[in-house]
Amino acid sequence: MLKLASISRWQAGGGHLAISAAIGVAVLAAMIFVWYPPPYFEAAGGNDLVLLMVGVDVALGPLLTLAVFNPGKGMRKLRFDLAVIGLCQLAALAYGVHVMFVARPAYLVYAVDRFDLVMNNQLSDAELAKAAPPWNARLLAMPPTVGARVPADPKLKEESLFLALGGVDLPQQPRFYVPYDEVAADAAKRAQPLSELRKLNPEAAARIDAVVAKSGRVEAQLGFLPARAPNRDFAVIVDRGSGAIVERAMLKPWT
């Protein structure tokens, strides 16, 4: 192992950059492939926070190392400076990961006539406690797709409406979740033709063509429904016969 005294300022900064970049890529990959599968990352607004994390952890840390690295100041002082930089980086990374974890997507919920990307921090402990398994716990894996039905019971319907008036909409009330298969037929009926999606996204004709080709269906067999998300709404493309989800596409779903 090289001793600090034998390393140049540029070698120290470059080595720190390589380590920081490797950690940043690993964390980003975990976020995208577990908590924020496409297109949820962009829809949830993860880009801005990740840019901040990259700026602090991948760029600022190595630059600080480059600035303070000077074996002439003494090994004890140099080790202290590098330890402080490393701890600051770890604290910033831990904070960023914590924010992304707390605000991760929990469910993609179909209700009434659209989908909603419901975030973990939009589900209260009180509402989760009223839900049946498996929807009474905060999931750690990829967000599943479910349906939400307006309850038939008059008392429950009134409670649901009261919560909605207070800002907790039906998709954020997990006690009324059902498997997506139970609402897929309704989603199929309410799906709009892809010709409407093309009108809303004239610059994305090639992307829509690719979705159709990948599905193995003709375009008339596909439709789309809007999906509301915290940062940017997107389109959920479904089979117009069964309601099965074909693609979640970062395309404008309404005017």
Image (cartoon, helix red, strand yellow):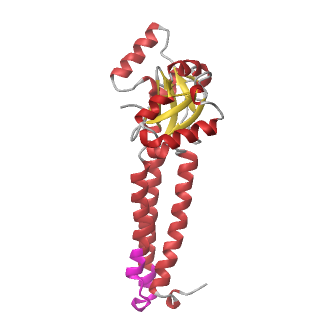
| Residue 72 falls inside the magenta stretch | yes
Please tell me how many numbered marks the rendered image carries: 0
The span picked out in magenta is 63-79
Whether residue 125 can be seen here: no
The residue depicted at 61 percent of the width and 84 percent of the height is 1
The image position of residue 200, as x and y in percent, is 41, 34
The image position of residue 90, as x and y in percent, is 46, 63
- Residue lying at the far right in this picture: please name it: 216
Quadrant of residue 82 in the image?
bottom left
The image position of residue 155, as x and y in percent, is 44, 9
- Residue lying at the far left in this picture: please name it: 166
The residue depicted at 56 percent of the width and 53 percent of the height is 30
The C terminus sits in image quarter? top left
The residue depicted at 50 percent of the width and 90 percent of the height is 5
The residue depicted at 57 percent of the width and 30 percent of the height is 219
| Residue 228 falls inside the magenta stretch | no
